[in-house]
Amino acid sequence: MKLKKRKKYSRMRGHRTCGYSAKLNKGKGSRGGMGMSGTGKRADQKKSLVIKLYGNKYFGKQGITSRKAKKKKIEVINLEEIENKFKEGQVDLSEYKILGDGEISKKFIIKAKAASSSAVEKIKKAGGEIVIIKKEKTEKKKEGKTEKIESK
């Protein structure tokens, strides 16, 4: 008569099914990893801790995730940079929006895509001027007639 029954995991060592049938009791694979990996991916474990440490940006996707969608990026430049980089006179910044950060003392005639009201004010105060370039007009044929349409 046995006095102490050994635990199943030690008795079944070396047996493929550990006492179960071949189809039952299969494992569920990896449940995460080390550290914070796998937290909150199943059920609700450690979610409050993760949110406390990292905020809500830890879960889900942020921003534009489609490869096709592209953000329109406007190139910007401040008056301070214009003052330091360019000599007095005409400056072609037709791809930029002019922002009013910094001071300007030279007289500039600037061609730009757009400008903030503070930038326009400061340039005019220094004796310069700003020329805002408007989009080109394109022609579109519609049922034999030619119409001029302004693109934005």
Image (tube, rainbow, N blue to C red):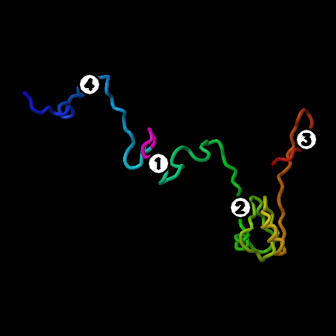
Q: CA distance from mark 4 to mark 2?
A: 68 Å
Q: Which quarter of the picture shows residue 39? A: top left
Q: Which residue is mark 2?
A: 76
Nearest-to-viewer mark from 1 and 3: 1
Q: Which residue is mark 4?
A: 20
Image height check: is 68 above or below 12?
A: below
> Residue extending furthest bottom?
105
- Is residue 45 covered in magenta? yes
- Is residue 119 found left or right of 71 in the rendered image? right
The x, y position of residue 115, in whole percent, is 78, 62
Query: For the magenta stretch, what is the residue range?
Result: 40-47
Q: CA distance from mark 3 to mark 4?
A: 80 Å
The x, y position of residue 116, in whole percent, is 78, 63
Mark found first going from the N terminus, 1 or 3: 1
Q: CA distance from mark 1 to mark 4?
A: 38 Å
Q: Which quarter of the picture shows residue 82? A: bottom right
What type is the residue that disc 3 sits on? Glu
